[in-house]
Amino acid sequence: MSLGLAGASTASANGLDPNRLFPADPASRTLAAQIYAGIKDLPIVSPHGHTDPRWFAENEAFPDLAQLFIVPDHYVFRMLFSQGIDLADLGVPRTDGVLSETDSRKIWRLFAENFHLFRATPSRMWLEHSFQQVFGWTKRISAETADEAYDHIADCLTRPEFRPRALFERFNIEVIATTESPLDDLNWHRQIRESGWSGRVITAYRPDAVVDPEFEGFAANVETLGALTGEAATTWQGYLKAHRARRAYFKSFGATSSDHGHATARTENLSQAQAEDLFQKALAGACTGEEADAFRGHMLTEMARMSLEDGLVLQIHPGSFRNHSGGVMQRFGRDKGFDIPTQTDYVRALKPLLDAVGLEKDLSIILFTLDETAYARELAPLAGVYPTLKLGPAWWFHDSPEGMRRFREMTTETAGFYNTVGFNDDTRAFCSIPARHDVARRVDCAYLASLVTSGRLDEDEAFEVAHDLTYRLAKQAYRL
């Protein structure tokens, strides 16, 4: 094994360590490897993500390395920005008309010169897995290897086997869900469907732009919602009908879930008169912060009721202080790495919704968190008793080997395995999808092996649970 000798240029002496992320003790490591061997080649089910459906509709070659690895990936550019590198120099588009860097090789060199910043991070694992397993590049990325790596991967991207659909099939993706606004015409999904390609790319209903009074352009967005559906969406009943119409439209393109990225987990179950009053205030731009939060909370309950009607799984992704930097928001727009986790209450926040629909066996609600302190105290006990609730996997800042392990340790004792939903990658970086799923599979196999060697799980059960966590639970939870 290399001890990091000066001048070493490879990621490791033999590429990726085949036993990475497995336990250190020999017995557990051997068993983890055996469990992993049984599930490592199962199809990828990716029920929640942010890949661009246009890639699969047009099936054009990815334009360049910067657009593939750096510009769309907030995990990458936020780390570089934290060290004083301007987002514009990394090719991230500005909203104020000032041009960002467009020279892909120059962006790549800047990334490569600073690749050491990713040491011991999940991003480095995902990136190196992509470089090695997808493109056959085994040398370590650095200033010295930047141009050679660029030329090697750029050459790969010119070949038909590296186009989006070919990679989709090579990655063994059974189904992938993108995420679109209710205002999206889903044209790219239509093109995919009409192309005759067999790859399953579905959408998910993400209504933040028309349920959050603090979302920029909320009133105009509601007007557009009405125009798209032919409903009087500026009236309360017309607004609800418009949502039902768009949800049905999304279902026609394969949607099995809705997704809600609210600042808090707050829910409300207001009277229709109260809800209509808040809605009119929201359209007028007159909501206080408290009223806006109450309206978002009530809309979660309304969406749960709609899910009982149409069967869409309800995903709640709360607890992010989004766009924390006003300056970055102004210059570069939303979702540029400045979404910061906050402490989140679930027990009290979810009670209005659960009082209304929490015992409905036909309703499926998947909860995520950025507040790990809530796992054992709130989330596992809630999911461990309410039939509507399931726990989403370790998410975003905790989408790491340590975060995944903590998730299992803090939730299994109360919620078990079968009140969780397997893994989803939640990524915009297409080539990282197999890497992320591989990390999750390895971490789960390591955890299961430790349960067996400590006498808490029978060995045959560990093999069965590994299959469930890798494949079956995601298909079942997301109705795929």
Image (cartoon, grey):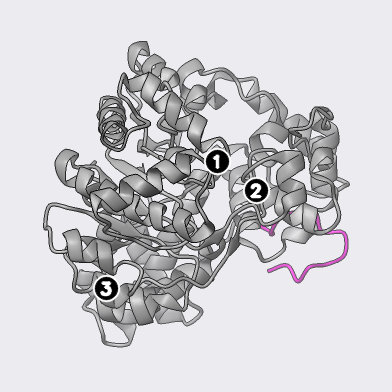
Up-down: is 239 above or below 268? Answer: above
User: What amino acid is at disc 2?
Assistant: His
Point 40% across, 14% down: residue: 191
Point 29% across, 81% down: residue: 413
Q: Are marks 3 and 1 in contact (CB under 8 Å)?
A: no
Q: Is residue 352 left or right of residue 221?
A: left
Comparing 465 with 341, the one in front is 341
Q: Which residue is mark 1?
A: 428
Residue 398, x across and y down, in percent:
52, 65
Comparing 265 with 77, the one in front is 265
| Crowding at mark 1 (Cα within 10 Å: few <14, some 14-19, many 20+) | some
Give the number of the mark in front: 2 or 3.
3
Q: Are marks 2 and 1 in contact (CB under 8 Å)?
A: yes
Point 15% across, 41% down: residue: 309
Residue 89, x across and y down, in percent:
84, 39
Up-down: is 321 above or below 237? Answer: below
Q: Which residue is mark 2?
A: 74
Among all residues in the image, which is located at the extreme bottom?
454
Residue 139, x across and y down, in percent:
74, 48
The Cα–Cα distance between marks 2 and 1, rounded to whole angstroms, is 9 Å
The Cα–Cα distance between marks 3 and 1, rounded to whole angstroms, is 30 Å
The Cα–Cα distance between marks 2 and 3, rounded to whole angstroms, is 31 Å
What span is in magenta? 1-15
To which quarter of the image does residue 33 belong?
A: bottom left
User: What amino acid is at disc 1?
Assistant: Arg
